[in-house]
Amino acid sequence: IALLSGVDLQCYENNHAHRTEEMDMEQLLVRRGQPFSVVLQCTDHIPRLPDHQLNLILHLGKNNEVVLKVSDSEQDHGKWWFSQRNAQGEVMLTLHSPADAPVGLYSMTVVLLSADGQLLEQTKSQTFYLLFNPWCKDDSVYLPSEELLQEYILNENGILYQGSWDDITTVPWNFGQFEKDVVDICFEVLDNSPAALKNSEMDIANRGSPVYVSRTITAMVNANDDRGVVSGRWDGEYSDGVAPTRWTGSVPILRRWSEGGGQRVRYGQCWVFTGVACTVLRCLGIPTRCITNYSSAHDTDANISVDYLFNDQLENVSEGRKDSIWNYHCWVESWMKRDDLPEGFDGWQVLDPTPLERSDGVFCCGPCPVHAVKEGEVGLKYDTPFVFSEVNADLIFWIVHPDGERIQVSQNSKVIGRNISTKSVYGDFREDITANYKHPEGSMKEREVYKKAGRQVGQKNKDPGQLKLFIKHAPAIHGTDFDVIIEVYNSGREDTDAQLTVTSNAITYNSIHRGECQRKTTSLTVQAHKAHKEVLRLQYDHYGACVSEHHMIRVTVMNCSINTSTVSLALVLLSMTDICSTFQIIGKAIVSHKLTAHISFTNPLPVSLQGGVFTVEGAGLTEAIEIKTHGKIEPGQAVTVKFSFKPTRAGLRKLLVDFDSDRLRDVKGEATVIVRTKMQNRNAVPEI
């Protein structure tokens, strides 16, 4: 007679206890190092031992290649074990997983053995996911702060920082790590890694390590050398895909990759790679946050300096050299122990999923301990010298004369690595974490770290002579004309003749030139102890045609003193601001009840726009949907669209919108919605 009739995985109770109830209630999702209970249903009482014995068999891997036998005693410390309690016609089995067990999809079978070990019966196998557990003291991702875990594991809404160091802008991002099917896709990403495809068993054995898993995810988020998720592109040509600025969250990207059978999704740039990596790592249970570094160095020749070469016409002649400064660059930090390193390097680790340089032959970067960067310990893995340069390189300006002679004009150690930012745990505002990455610029400690990082401390800024350069600008609003004011101050005792050259170039956020907007050359005489002011008016007629989707302009100024033949250089990055879309939500937000939103946008440009499209999404509110506008949107014209949706999950939710058109992209907006589980009856009599 069959005794075992089935297993109840108790998804509701277990998922609630393991803080995964937002992900799913239909499938079992548990965290390692924390017990969970299932109920074995029986048709009759199971005869008592020693006549019969219950065992559990776990399989792990796509083809069940790893088999684990679960014993009913705790004697094997660090192994799976279970305890049982018999009740009327049922047996409660409580499973205990080791805190370093591989994460992944497990299948579980309960077997009934006779006293001599003969298989009498077994249940149908059932599956569950095992995740990292930052709430468990023995897990290497343990983070002992409920406040931090609420943000770095459980928060599905985030903010990514863009703009420039002196004009920081925000972009809301929907991580959506608990949206339907996302956990399945995250493990699909791991299963498609080159290591998993080559040797699945070895890959599974390594999946207990957050160092291994996070490095794999960092490589797999970009599609450079594997079946990765997002393809990077920076040249403005996105017609065969989605422009990077269009995305407002990770979920549509992950779903598109999965539905396409692992085909790369076009296109992403650094914040897109960062947003997707943060979603996957939070979903797997590794505490993760998004970081933006301003004036971020991309040092390709590992000399911990960025060299800019100009000719005497102020044209960039750095061809063949790829060193550059990105207006900003985004990466993630994940929290973990580093048992593979000497003591003192646990905690936040840099992981950079943007394909910049190869690391051990693969486009990935990290995990690199933030503390190692601060202390100049560039010998520690992974990729510490590269991250050290991103936040700490020197900027060197050179003038190249027609005969090829190079003159170093200035060396500046204070330009690179500014206002390193992440979203605060306490709300939607910015936390500056620059001090985690480096000692105060110019301090004794910082100089020591430079020496330790293997380079001689270079000379300070060369004296540019008696003429000093300053650049100021009015607020730069995209679509308007605005002024840039250059001040040449003469600190000497004599009047000085000079030639001033000013150029403005449209650039992308990562320093790719898109064309010269305007140029001005002036001969001037600067009186002793006085300043000469020169105004460059940047007109939309000039910059509108060549400005990139990032709406950035670099103004470069060169001043040649005729009397002393000294040259000084200065540059400023202008990040133009856009107007936002506005939201109006009609009605009360209740799970599974229809809700209507109105979105309005006014064309801020002096030209008409065509091909307008709104993209709207929100975790727990609606999947990504597109709403097209019809016809032209004339200068100053407002356009309003409305759409309806049914919230799927209760709580504080964010609805994100992006507007794109032929001449204007990346206009963002957001609305916060409190979703309730059911209608509240205001006239109800309170219960006593």
Image: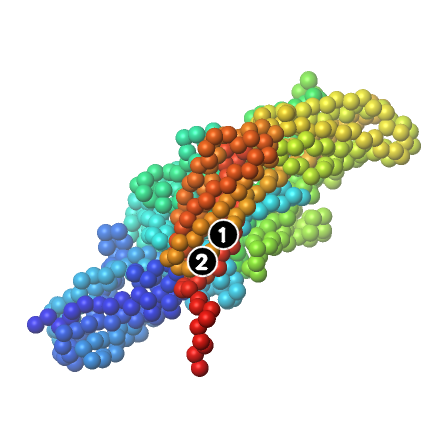
The image shows residue 315 at horizontal and vertical percentages of 65, 23
Q: Which residue is mark 2?
A: 589
The image shows residue 279 at horizontal and vertical percentages of 44, 51
Q: Left or right: 563 with respect to 34?
A: right
Q: Where on the picture, by quarter, is residue 476? A: top right
- As drawn, 597 above or below 122: above
Out of 235 and 618, give the one closest to the viewer: 618
Identify the amino acid type marked 2. Answer: Ala
- As drawn, 45 above or below 614: below
Circles 2 and 1: CB atoms closer than 8 Å = yes
Q: How is the image coloured?
A: rainbow
Q: Residues within 10 Å of mark 2 (few under 14, many from 20)?
A: many
For image coordinates 36% across by 45% down, the residue present is 255
Outermost residue toward the left in this view: 1
The quarter of the image holding the C terminus is bottom left
Q: Left or right: 110 with respect to 448?
A: left
- As drawn, 458 above or below 104: above
The image shows residue 487 at horizontal and vertical percentages of 79, 33
Which secondary structure, mark 2?
A: loop
Q: Is residue 495 visible?
A: yes
The quarter of the image holding the N terminus is bottom left
Identify the amino acid type marked 1. Answer: Ile
The image shows residue 584 at horizontal and vertical percentages of 52, 50
Out of 362 and 652, give the one closest to the viewer: 652
In the picture, the disc for residue 351 is: none
Mark 2 and mark 1: span between their CA atoms? 9 Å
For image coordinates 23% across by 61% down, the residue present is 126
Q: Which residue is mark 1?
A: 585
Q: Left or right: 53 with respect to 62?
A: left
Q: Is residue 141 visible?
A: no
Outermost residue toward the front in this view: 683
Out of 543 and 381, give the one closest to the viewer: 543
